[in-house]
């Protein structure tokens, strides 16, 4: 698959990855041939990037930390929990707990796989994709840190529900610490909602409270210093920020490509984020996700087809064309070769193609 801007999609292109609604239903199924009407519909839904099948990548098997069924199930159960809250019924976490168990089990089985975060976001599903992405990143970090299965489940459910306070109707001050900011309000609201659930650890509830706390004490809602923030809060603070940096639906001023978002995270180490946690985060994420089109220092253009664990900035790239306009079609007879940047140390990535 290749990951491209919606403006590059043409009728006849084949969708490489399914697109989900906020309740886990399939908006468009993978392998469908896109029409003008479908492309326009995706634009109306706010889609900016999509995954497409590419005949030059048919032999490439993209590894995923989570299966499509597990991701879809997590979105569906998160949606059901949110609907309960919005209907004033309180939160039913049983479905979420089932999804969390599957997420932890699959992450442990696929612990060597770097995260690509290729889900397609729409206006409708943005909150759910964000919550799932943060959960996946947090659990992969937790596996790398050697957490037990129980700890991973506590981390997973707290990270999946870290923004749950955003869907609760405002019924007055959530806490004496409340200020005039959406972040401050939803952290306390989420914490107060989750801490009342006897099925959930108080540690998980604190993730909702602490994921906007910074290690230098400048965060909210309580301005905690590094030693006062739980490890899980430090993890989810990084994952939450990173996914907001790369999402066109967040409140960030600009949407960053993954490698720039990683650089932003690195630049905020010891200010917002714990330095050791940043190091662990960078070991888990693909700076150049599989399917990304790159420019190389050789003047060639290629697509990322594989990742090198431990060297996230040096992926394997399939060279498809040289000095060609980015949106030109490549003929079937065009020469193709694969370059492993972990071995070709004199070749560098000079940019990405939008």
Image (spheres, grey):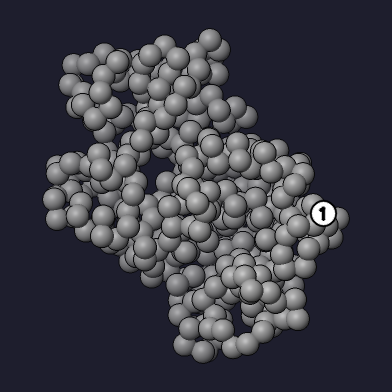
**In this orientation, does residue 280 appear?**
no
Can residue 209 be seen in this snapshot? Answer: yes
Quadrant position of the N terminus in the picture: top left
Res 38 → quadrant: bottom left
Q: Quadrant of residue 190?
A: bottom right
Residue corresponding to mark 1? 226
In the rendered view, would you say 187 is above or below 280? below
Left or right of residue 76: residue 239: right
Residue 301, above or below 210: above
Q: Position of residue 62 (x, y in %)?
A: 41, 37
Quadrant housing the C terminus: top left
Residue 312 in the image, given as x and y percentages of width and height: 57, 31
Answer left or right for 197 relative to 116.
right
Q: Identify which residue is drawn at 59% across, 70% down.
A: 182
Q: Residue at x 41, y 30 (%)?
A: 352
Query: Which residue is located at x 27 percent, y 50 percent?
Result: 30
**Residue closest to the eye, 275 or 221:** 221
The x, y position of residue 191, in whole percent, is 68, 75
Which residue, as the protein is rendered here, is positioned at the far right? Answer: 227
Picture residue at 57% right of the left edge, 63% below the top: 160
């Amino acid at each position: 698959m290749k990951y491209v801007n919606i403006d590059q999609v043409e009728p006849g292109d084949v969708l490489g990855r399914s697109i989900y609604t906020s309740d886990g239903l399939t908006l468009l199924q993978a392998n469908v041939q896109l029409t003008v009407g479908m492309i326009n519909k995706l634009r109306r839904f706010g889609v900016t990037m999509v995954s497409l099948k590419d005949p030059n990548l048919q032999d490439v098997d993209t590894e995923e930390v989570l299966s499509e069924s597990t991701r879809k199930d997590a979105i569906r159960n998160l949606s059901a929990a949110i609907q309960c809250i919005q209907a004033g019924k309180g939160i039913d976490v049983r479905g979420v707990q089932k999804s969390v168990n599957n997420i932890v089990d699959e992450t442990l089985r696929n612990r060597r796989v770097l995260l690509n975060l290729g889900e397609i976001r729409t206006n409708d599903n943005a909150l759910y994709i964000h919550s799932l992405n943060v959960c996946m990143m947090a659990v992969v970090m937790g596996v790398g840190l050697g957490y037990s299965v129980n700890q991973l489940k506590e981390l997973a459910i707290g990270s999946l529900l870290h923004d749950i306070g955003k869907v609760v109707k405002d019924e007055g001050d959530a806490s004496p610490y409340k200020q005039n900011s959406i972040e401050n309000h939803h952290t306390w609201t989420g914490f107060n909602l989750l801490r009342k659930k006897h099925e959930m650890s108080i540690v998980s509830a604190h993730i909702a409270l602490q994921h906007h706390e910074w290690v230098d004490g400048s965060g909210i809602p309580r301005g905690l210093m590094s030693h006062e923030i739980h490890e899980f809060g430090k993890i989810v603070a990084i994952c939450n920020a990173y996914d907001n940096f790369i999402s066109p639906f967040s409140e960030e001023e600009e949407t960053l490509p993954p490698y720039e978002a990683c650089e932003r995270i690195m630049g905020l180490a010891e200010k917002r984020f714990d330095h050791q946690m940043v190091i662990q985060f960078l070991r888990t994420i693909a700076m150049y996700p599989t399917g990304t089109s790159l420019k190389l220092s050789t003047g060639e253009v290629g697509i990322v087809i594989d990742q090198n664990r431990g060297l996230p900035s040096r992926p394997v790239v399939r060279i498809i064309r040289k000095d060609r306009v980015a949106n030109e079609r490549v003929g079937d007879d065009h020469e193709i070769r694969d370059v492993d940047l972990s071995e070709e140390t004199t070749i560098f990535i000079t940019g990405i193609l939008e």
